[in-house]
Every structure is written in C-alpha cells, then in structure tokens.
Image (cartoon, rainbow, N blue to C red):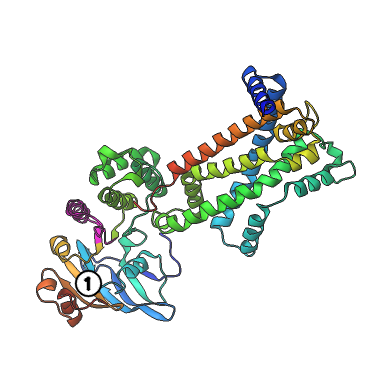
Amino acid sequence: MPERGRRIIPFPLPPALAATGLQVEGIRLEREGNALLDGTDLALSPHGISALMGPNGAGKTLLLRVIAGLETPEAGEVRMPAHMRGRVGLVFQRPVLLRRSLRGNLTHALRLARVPRQDRNDRLAELLELGQLDRIADRPARRLSGGEAQRLAIVRALARRPALLLVDEPTAHLDPRGAQAVEALLGRIARDGTKVVLVSHDTGQVSRIAAEVAFLHRGRCREVTPMPAFLSAPQSAEARAYLEGSILL
Amino acid sequence: MPEIGDSILTALGLIVSGDPDLIEIVLLSLRVSLTAVALAAMIGVPLGAALAVLRFPGRGALVLLVNALMGLPPVVVGLFVYLCLSATGPFGVFGLLYTPGAMIIAQTILVAPIIAALSRATLAEMAAEYDDTLRMLGASPTETIATLLWDARFALVTALLAGLGRALAEVGAVMLVGGNIDHVTRVMTTAIALETSRGALPMALGLGMVLLLLTLILNAAVIGLRARFEGPAHA
C-alpha cells in the first residue's frame, strides 16, 4: 500500500495475538487552517468489527483515509500490529468500479495483488462465492445495482488478503435487503479473521454486527465502548447527545 | 435546378457503378488519412497519457501548447511542410514533396495535437476518478497508466475517429504539399475543389456524397462508442 510520509509503526504481536489492535495516536490533520482531525486517539480491539460513529463532519472518513495511507497527517501516528502492515483494504462509500465486467474487476484486482496466474481462477471463484456474485459475473460492473456494486467493491478489496478492512458507510444508499446482504458479508469476513472497521450512522446496523463503537466528534475520539453498552449507556456527553439526535455537528 | 438534379443522378451513377477514377481517389484519401491518424496516435496517445498522469515542470505550458495546436490553420501547416520538403528545404533530399508521403506528414502534424489533447482530457478525468481505488488495490504508476489506457479505450477510439474526421476533411495542407496531381496525390477534398472549379459537377458531387457518407459513419461510430463508454461514474 502506498505511503506518503505517514508514520506507521509496526510492532510484533504478543504470543496471545489478542492484546492490541489498531492504535491511532494524536492524529492531527488540517485543511485551510481548520483542524479536521484534532489530536485523534483511539485503540481498537484486534478482532471482529469495530464501528466508527459520529455526526457528519466528525472526521470518520478522513480518519479511515489516514489509516489507509491516502492522507498524510500533520502530526500523530498510526500504530498497527506487524501482520496488518501493508495489508490494509479500503472500501469507499461510493466505490469506483472499473469499466469492465464484474469478473474483469476482480481479475484485475488479483493481478494487481500479484496473485500468481495459476491461482487466479481459484481466488476469483472464492471471491465471487463470498460476495454471492457468481451468477452475474459477466455483467458490466457499472450496470450493477447498488448492493451488488458494494459487495463487488468489498470482495475486490479482499484480493490482497487484507488483515485490516476499512469500510466507509457501505449501506448508506442501499435498501434493507441490500444492506442485510452487505452486513452478512462483513460478518463473514470478520469471522474469517480480517479485522473490520466500519463507518456507520445506523445504530441498528452497529448493534447487529459491531463488537465496539469508537465515537468521533469534531475530529476527536470521545469514547471507545463495547456494544451494547454504547447504545444503552454511552460514556461521553457528545455520544449521548448524538444518540438522542440533538447534535448535528 | 434540373442541371443540379441531373448532376446528382449522374453522381449516384458513378458511385453505384464503381467509377475507377472515383474509387482510386477515395482509396488514396483513406490510405493517406488512416496512415496519418495511425502515426498521430503513436505520438498523441502517449503524450496525452503523460500529460494526464505525470507531474513535471512545464507540464501546464505543454498542455496549453497542445490545446492551442488543435486549432492549427491547415494552410500554415501545409506551408511549413512545403518549406521543409522543398528542394532547398532541410528535408528536400528525401524527394517527398508532391507525394502521398508529404500529405501524410502534413495530416499527422494537424491530427496529433487533436488526439493528444482529447486523450489527455479523457485520461486526466479518469485518473482523478480511479486514483485512490488503484492505490488501494496496489497498482504501481505503470499499472495505473495501463489500467487507464485500457478502461479509456472506447474514449480513445473516439479521439482517433475525431482525428480521422479532421484528416479526411482537410484540403489546404494536402493541396499545398501534394499538388493535387491526377493518379498520384489527388484525394477527395482536392478533387472536389478542382472538379467544381472546372464545372464537372457529377464527379464533385459523387466525391462529396462519399465524403459525407464517411463523415456520417465516423460520427455514428463516435456516438455509438460514447454510449458504450459513458456509464455512471459510480455504481
């Protein structure tokens, strides 16, 4: 994965492999004099699905981009276990699909991931099955429905076998059925061992699939709380106000 | 009006019967213009890709220059090539003046900036759209350019067709460097100009109809390719 001067500090996993996951320390990122991430600190569990919640403009998407290496912060560090380094996938809220068939998108991703030619067909079949996209594999990617497109974007990101998958509001534009399919897919990916960090505004979705919630407000992480405690008894005043619908920014 | 009507009928007869002179002129036109577009594509597409993706000092000025060269006056290009290829010019030794080769050179100079500018515009837009996605998929700069060229292939073909349209319709430059010599350098546009000036309307109209038909086919191809190429930016 490309890095533009961002500091990623790998550290060896302890024997138990479970003590520490992704850590973000003091990330500060400014645009035109405004601090969009203002000393963001958080530490997430190493397994399962963690949700990033917060009002619009809180810095959730920007934080994902910093973790993925697409943005270089003015200060701060992203620390991740050694097995995650260079193995980070990012699924955008509005995924850009290549002007090829669904199969062509996946094949190209596998090629870019340096998957040996003799293994590509097996991996392709595996990804198609995972995304439940087998029957529409030859359809032009840009003619897919919103749900199919999101599932394609998610399984395409798995071509590099990421240890950390960042997913930005994958169901924001989907109907309940499409959202359910995406949730099931993310659940399966997490169960298979990939750490998933999910940005979502949907408390129902978070309660269904996330094990913990990191709440961001004005570029800072206000709390990281396990589910379902976050929804029933949030620790910060900002999260309480957000869940009550009384803060917008 | 009856005279024009008769001329049109005679022109249609020339086309339908496959008049040898008409066929020869059409084939030479296609040979010159297709060769020029192929050469211009070899220069214009890589140049457009480089201007779209790479960042280097002077890039902005080069983009401005390429865009400005799209509007090159054909007669000025013809004059420039004429001076270069004339007996006293720097390339006079090759003896290319008044040959199809000279016409190909002139048309290449006219068409290359068009292909470069259209390619750059297409690839720059797509690069902005694809950049983050390809970075996350692990693409190297070379793989990024290769991906863009493949995914923009239909749009790039429309750029080539636009260049071919310009080459086929061009008259000033090929007249100057080709000389409109019968059975040697006479192409559709120069033949139409000559036949009209001497009152031989059926041949002029017949060639005009073929040129119009080719232009219509090219435009239909461009529209068809655009319809196939242009999908929603996001799924």
Where is residue B194? Give x, y as percent: 77, 33
The boundaries of the magenta stretch are A167-196
Q: Residue drawn at (44%, 42%), measured in percent from left and top?
A: B227
Q: State the image quarter where residue A94 is shown.
A: bottom left
Label 1 belongs to which residue? A214
Where is residue A71? Give x, y as percent: 41, 68
**Protein chain holding label 1:** A
B163 and A36: which is toward the camera: B163
Could you say whether the residue bearing mark 1 is in a helix, strand or loop?
A: strand
Residue A182 belongs to magenta span = yes
Q: Is residue B195 above or below residue A199?
A: above
Q: Is residue B131 among what the camera can see? A: yes
Q: State the image quarter where residue A179 is shown.
A: bottom left
B32 and B196: which is toward the camera: B196
- Outermost residue toward the front in this view: B1
Q: Residue drawn at (56%, 50%), measured in percent from left and top?
A: B119
Where is residue B33? Give x, y as percent: 67, 36
Q: Is residue B166 above or below residue B58?
A: above
- Residue kind at label 1, given as amino acid type: Ala
Q: Is residue A88 left or right of residue B49?
A: left
Where is residue B150? Give x, y as percent: 48, 44
Residue B201 belongs to magenta span = no
- Placement of the N terminus of chain B among the 4 image quadrants: top right
- Outermost residue toward the top in this view: B17
Q: Is residue A210 among what the camera can see? A: no
